[in-house]
Image (cartoon, rainbow, N blue to C red):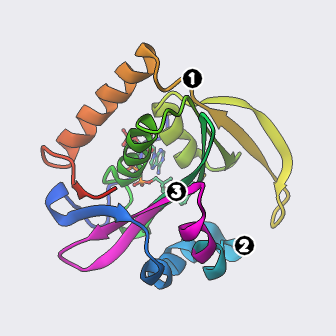
Amino acid sequence: MVQSSPPVQSVTSEDLLIRRMRIVDIPEIMQIESVSFGKHHWSEDSFRYEIKNQIGRYYSLIHRKEDRLIGYGGYWLIFDEAHITTIAVHNEFRGNGLGDLLLVKMIDRMGTQSVKWVTLEVRTSNTSAQNLYYKYHFRSMGTRPRYYQDTNEDALIMTTENIQSQDFRSVFRENKMHLIERLGGKMPEGAD
Ligand SMILES: CC(C)(COP(=O)(O)OP(=O)(O)OC[C@H]1O[C@@H](n2cnc3c(N)ncnc32)[C@H](O)[C@@H]1OP(=O)(O)O)[C@@H](O)C(=O)NCCC(=O)NCCS
């Protein structure tokens, strides 16, 4: 399996805060968007809409000492299914477990919202993100041909098993334990 590279900047839980996304976060989000998703990234208006979207829940990851936003993620809640719509980490901070952290935060929250299945789409070429999802036992369910209009690339459709099941809970617990160790022994402060 391809290994992730060491981070340019290291962080621990002490440095971090994870909280609901706010409108004032959007300028910093846009910088990460363009680096992460290229020309066809979400617009400021999309984020403005999503922050207020009744079925959406979006989180920002803040570096407290540097007072800057270094990641974000969000999902839609549709009955007992959650659809992850976005997740990204600032390129300088990748490889610290922060993609893990955003995913754990979202799945933890989904668990309190009676979600059973989590789905998402990911570019077939995006192996870093796919590895993250495989780690949390997402499975590939097929493709949406030419889903990404910029390059005509296919999307891989990925989904979890029932996240309330014993099997999923035990994988999730173990990954979360490793994440906590990696971040210095505790989860970062957060607000729902
Ligand atoms: C995908 C992304 C959010 C991962 O964030 P990250 O903070 O670098 O990831 P983490 O350090 O938490 O790594 C978690 C897991 O992801 C996988 N992974 C992350 N980077 C990887 C890389 N460069 N190569 C291979 N696997 C990688 C590994 O499975 C890793 O687990 P491990 O550390 O136990 O090996 C980040 O690369 C990113 O923002 N990419 C651009 C935006 C994007 O593609 N979003 C996904 C859209 S579907």
Rate crowding at label 2 as few (under 14), some (14 to 19) or many (20 or more) other CA atoms within 10 Å.
few
Would residue 148 be found to the left or right of residue 70 on screen?
right
Residue 86 visible? The answer is no
- The residue that mark 1 highlights is 161
Amino acid on which disc 3 is placed: Gly
Using the numbered discs, state the Cα–Cα distance from disc 3 to disc 1 in whole angstroms.
19 Å
Under circle 3, the secondary element is: strand
Q: Residue furthest top?
A: 166
- Confirm if mark 1 falls within 8 A of ligand 1: no
Residue 153 % position (x, y): 80, 54
Would residue 13 be found to the left or right of residue 6 on screen?
left
Residue 171 % position (x, y): 38, 23
Residue 31 visible? The answer is yes
Residue at 84% over, 63% down: 149
Residue 54 % position (x, y): 59, 59
Residues at badges 2 and 3 in contact (C-beta under 8 Å)? no
Q: Is residue 142 above or below residue 185?
A: above
* Residue 172 figure quarter: top left
- The residue that mark 3 highlights is 74
- The residue that mark 2 highlights is 40
Residue at 26% over, 71% down: 63
Would residue 39 be found to the left or right of residue 188 on screen?
right
Residues at badges 3 and 1 in contact (C-beta under 8 Å)? no
Magenta region, residue range: 48-72
Pick the front one: 29 or 189: 189
Would residue 123 be found to the left or right of residue 174 on screen?
right
